[in-house]
Amino acid sequence: MNLARQGFSFLLIGGGLVLADWAVFVMLTALGVPAPAANVAGRVVGALLGFWANGRVTFGSALGRHRFFRFALLWLILTMLSTYLVTVVANHLGLQMAWLAKPLVEGCLSLLSFIVSRHWVYR
């Protein structure tokens, strides 16, 4: 598959996923849910949509248990990193700064996610 097409598709789909993830995070933290739990909940929403959308649309792969296991492992690692970073911001700079930082954190992690997804998860 063409790298440029995959990258563009990953960006479009990823933008929607980050928006959904961020909206869940902001909503839950505004309701008093601690930042770590709200971050994981937001990332779960993104993951539920992302596995299918990126697997089928971006990488044109058949989905199955093997690929899902790889996706889940990548998701777990990135979720731990994301949760740590967003929680540090929330604890040191406040909740509103965490709301602003969340899309930036996810955007930075998306480059790693694209590379690993392309070469390992959906291969």
Image (cartoon, helix red, strand yellow):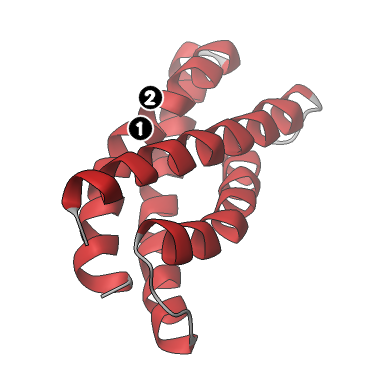
| Residue 87 locus on image (x, y percent) | 48, 33
Q: Marks 1 and 2: in contact by CB < 8 Å?
A: yes
Q: Is residue 89 left or right of residue 50?
A: left
Q: Secondary structure at mark 2?
A: helix
Task: Write the residue at 78% across / 28% down.
Answer: 32
Say if residue 61 shows up in the picture. yes
Please give the residue where the numbered disc 2 appears in the rendered image. Answer: 104
Where disc 1 sits, the SS reads helix
Numbered label attached to residue 107: 1
Of the pair 88 and 14, the residue shown nearer to us: 14
Identify the residue at the far bottom of this view. Answer: 65
- Amino acid, disc 2: Leu
Image quarter hosting the N terminus: bottom left
Where residue 97 appears, as percent x and y from the top left, is 50, 13
Left or right position of 74 against 72:
left
* Numbered circles on residues, count: 2
Whole-percent x, y for residue 10 in the image? 37, 46
Question: What quarter of the picture does the C terminus occupy?
Answer: bottom left
Q: Is residue 26 above or below residue 3?
A: above
State the CA–CA distance, disc 2 to disc 1.
Answer: 5 Å
